[in-house]
Amino acid sequence: MNKIADLIEANLERLAIAESLDNGKPIWLAKKVDIPRASSNMRFFAQAITQFATQAHEMNSAINYTLREPLGVVGTISPWNLPLYLFTWKVAPALAAGNCVIAKPSEVTPMTAYLLSEICIEAGLPAGVFNIVHGDGLKVGAEIAKHAKIKAVSFTGSTRVGAEIAKVAAPVFKKVSLEMGGKNPNIIFADCDYDKMLRTTVQSSFANQGQICLCGSRIFIERPIYEKFKKDFVAKTSALKVGHPSDDTSKLGAVVSKPHYEKVLSYIELAKEEGGNILTGGHAIHPEGYEEGWYIAPTIIEGLPHDCRTNQEEIFGPVVTIMPFDTEEEVLTYANSTVYGLSSTLWTENLSRAHRMAKQIDAGIVWINTWLLRDLRTPFGGVKNSGVGREGGFEALRFFTEPKNVCIQY
Ligand code: NAD
């Protein structure tokens, strides 16, 4: 696995270009985030397995010890938004725990998974240990989900497909880990570190064209700073360059596909129908020379209630809404009002409030005064319709192993 990580690093340029061609993300972003993270995933779990221990439970005249054995053959199914990053995030713990893996990348972005197969051959991984199967969700994904000899399936993707997988995996008693959609709140109090908050909020709203499950798409601002925030956030957002992914000055590239482009634009229309006021963006962009590309201007919408469809459904594009609030209770009601509960971001310098709010937010991840700061040892995943189970660190190694208790009387 360390050799695979080395080879991913050695192929950084080639992998980043492939990721960008498939996905539309800027090449600089793939070079900075996606590909380095893919090699870290491999390296991290290669190390983590050496630290993974089991428990012993002593009785009066007996001792129990627990073995953690590989499951056998396991399946992974991943999405298009962070293709190699999320693909390796699942495959690495599955392999480290001693399983053979059948892994399906998204049919929309298969290229880097293919290149990884070449890397694994070069690294000397024995044939049959890691099997990359390309194809559509309905054909290949559904087979992985229901095949009785595949003992577990780790899925990342939409809530709709997660529900399908849960349905077919249940009758064959398959272990499932489901990482699904989100509609994450970004809650900004007037006492925050304003400049850091503003800088980070631009990123947490529009990084990767807003196509990160952890993006904060509902932004709640305490009323005393609402107007100032609105003015500054709109100014910074309108200045973001949307352009060809190979241009290093493009802050946003294209969205992933034509159907997704149409979906995001249809949500902007819905927001208008619901009475939303577009403060910036709200339309497609046609950069010179690339007029046919699927580019969308980063969009900020205000004036919508927290419970309208625009604020309840996952858009998964460069579209955010902003809303003022007056009290902690009120913003908690707004934040927790969706069916999702993946991540949340909180901006305040008030320590007591930070802890109080963190405990009450319905989300698997709470970032306070930061966003997307990841320690790969921590539990990663969502609550409500955002997830079942947790990835990351020993949680992932526990998922990909079966405990067996051995009791000896003496
Ligand atoms: P998707 O659910 O359409 O597809 C994800 C994967 O599932 C693909 O590989 C697809 O081929 C496969 N698939 C489709 N139908 C299937 C079926 N019936 N059985 C088995 N597999 C099937 O999701 P997407 O459009 O690729 O990705 C976007 C979604 O992923 C968003 O909802 C986003 O929030 C979510 N996501 C979540 C996380 C997280 O960590 N929670 C991370 C990234 C993306």
Image (cartoon, rainbow, N blue to C red):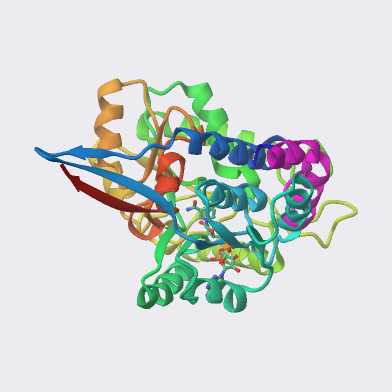
Q: Which x, y percent locates residue 312?
A: 40, 59
Residue at image point 64% right, 65% down: 260
| Res. 337 image quadrant | bottom left
Q: Which x, y percent locates residue 390?
A: 40, 49
Relative depth, front residue between 184 and 38: 38
* Quadrant in the picture for the N terminus: top right
Q: What span is colored magenta in the figure? A: 3-30
Which residue of the protein is positioned furthest toward the front in this rendering? 410
Q: Which x, y percent locates residue 15?
A: 78, 46
Residue at image point 45% right, 71% down: 165
Q: Is residue 10 magenta?
A: yes
Left or right of 13 on screen, residue 365 = left
| Picture layout, residue 21 above or below residue 346 | below
Residue at image point 78% right, 43% down: 27
* Quadrant in the picture for the C terminus: top left
Relative depth, front residue between 156 and 208: 156
Relative depth, front residue between 81 and 288: 81
Residue 243 appears in the rendering: no
Q: Quadrant of ligand 1?
A: bottom right
Q: Main secondary structure of the magenta part?
A: helix
Left or right of 275 on screen, residue 285 = right
Which residue of the protein is positioned furthest toward the left in this rendering? 60
Q: Is residue 191 magenta?
A: no
| Res. 402 image quadrant | bottom left
Q: Which x, y percent locates residue 11?
A: 80, 41
